[in-house]
Amino acid sequence: MAQEFKDASSCWKEIMSDVSKNKELLSVIEKFAMENNAPAKVVFGTSGWRGEIGNDFTFNNLRIVTSAIIEMLKSEDKSVMDAMGIPDFNEVKRRGIIVGHDNRFLGKDFAFEVIGMLQKEGIKTWYAGETITPEISAGIEMLNAACSINLTPSHNPANYAGFKFNPSDGGPAGTELTSKIEEIANSKMSQSLIFEQAKPVKIENIDLTSLYIKYITERNTIDLEKIRSFINKEDCIICVDNVHGATRGKIQRILGDSPKIKYLRTEDDLLFGGVAPEPSEKNMHRVEQVLRESRARFRLGVIMDPDGDRIRHTDAKMQLPMNYFGAMAFHFLNVHKGISGVAVKSVGTSNLLNAIAEKQGISVKETKVGFKNFRPYLLKTSKERAIVAFEESDGITGYNHTLEKDAIFGLLLAIEMVAVTGRDLSEYLKDIMDEFGYYYPDRSGIAVDRALVGEPLLTKLSVIRELYKKGTEVDVGGQKRMVKDVITVDGTKLVFDDSSWLMIRPSGTEPKVRFYIEARTQEGKKAVFETAERITKEALRD
């Protein structure tokens, strides 16, 4: 007798309890996705709208969000059109919209729903098929498209689907657009509207990988010939873990087949082997094993998420999270490649970059969390152009490159670093730290009362910036530290006189306060964390 489930969530719970045994239950999830017309709350976070397949993310709710975008574009509101970089709706119809997806469950079906609705409005569409976020970003520019819709929840587990929207500059949609989409979509949700399927009239396929290769060749931030020569001539091994994601096959097309490049988890697996497909420290173990078993002089490994916008590096001696790799990328692009501009990072990232930039006489721009906040420094027309832009959560781009974070760029740049410096990544990092100082970043947090989520928590934590102004003395592990700087672009960041720091910010989605810290010694991290927790609890008591 077939197993009965009251909703998609209970079915997903059963599937994820044993993915090899229960994968046939995906047909039940598909039924929920097609038949469940219950509305959902649409929220575009730092990187799009995400929801559980069959529960929040259903075919009808996807149609509602797509119709909200169409309505927004047809309104020709000036603020919307300015943010889109498009004069009017006729231009949107003429220039067209790229639609793609990663290789999750129902990705193609969801994409065809979107294409059908766009074509019904007379909008030209390109179907990118299984693709990755940076390819779509580059493709918008190469095709002069009006915008894109990419159906991916990035690194979320297999039970999630997602919806990313990018305007004509190829970057993530800003709040001028996402707030309008949310407003219209949630209004439609409140009316419990049911939209009929609109099947595509014609599918026009586009090969975004070939456009991406042309894009990076023309931009010339990455030296592909140097990279290819290094792989061919040097004693090296490169290991790439695709975690069953849509990055599979991309590197082969860019660099060609080579026995020196090993690829892991390239097979079809809609459930990602039951793991969250993120470039985490834990998920890196397969790459590290391949590198440890090799006797090659140069060893480099990476893991990428399913839509190719996050990456983590290793060389078998150590893992290099983006806190370190972003600073290394800045040093390499500025010192070894002679690229000038400004250094850009989210406020919760390591101050190793700040130390390098200070000695190089280069300005540092620290932004709120969210890649869309880097846009002012990534446009070709920017007066202050980013040499590199990166965030602590594994995202990076560089000078004259995409406005989206790009794992492929992160890999290619790492190979070029090794080729030019003649050093493995950990050796290059040690050289940099020997010159500019040692920094040890980390993050943690504490749970708070659920009633505090939102404005109440923001209000309580805001007193920290008043209590700890520049010049204030703070006890950190029994040592007196002076507050050298206070940065309030995203929470409150206190920078001390030894360049250690702590940042306290509320989670946007959970009843938690997050701590981002950096100490000058490995042992010193505990004291900085304890200080962040003490300051937070004092603020919450008031």
Image: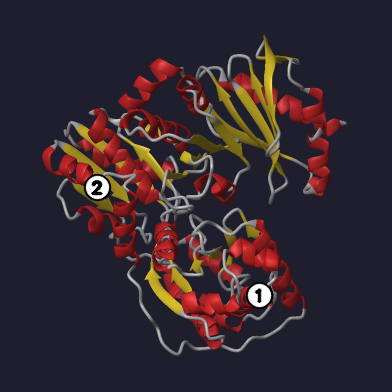
Above or below, comparing residue 480 to residue 43 in the picture: above
Disc 2: which residue:
224
Estimate how packed mark 2 is, as few (under 14), some (14 to 19) or many (20 or more) residues with alpha carbons within 10 Å.
some
Measured from the top left, where is residue 517 in percent x and y?
60, 28
Residue 309 visible in the current orientation: yes
Q: Which x, y percent locates residue 539?
A: 81, 30
Three-letter amino acid code at disc 1? Ala
Please state which of residues 264 and 134 is positioned toward the viewer in this rendering.
134
Q: Is residue 42 visible?
A: no
Q: Quadrant of residue 445?
A: top right
Answer left or right for 60 relative to 96.
right
Residue 523's label in the rendered image is none
Type of the residue with mark 2: Leu
Please give left or right for residue 56 compared with residue 232 in the image: right
Tag 2, which secondary structure?
helix
Label 1 SS = helix
Q: Is residue 398 left or right of residue 71?
A: left
Q: In the displayed orientation, state which residue is furthest to the right.
A: 542
**Where is mark 1, residue-wise?**
68
Q: Is residue 173 above or below residue 474?
A: below
Q: Is residue 239 above or below residue 54?
A: above
Farthest-out residue, left: 233
Residue 500, given in percent of the width and then of the height, sits at: 59, 20
First reached walking from the N terminus: tag 1 or tag 2: 1
Q: Which is closer to the viewer, label 1 or label 2?
A: 2
Residue drawn at 55 percent across, 31 percent down: 364
The quadrant where residue 444 appears? top right
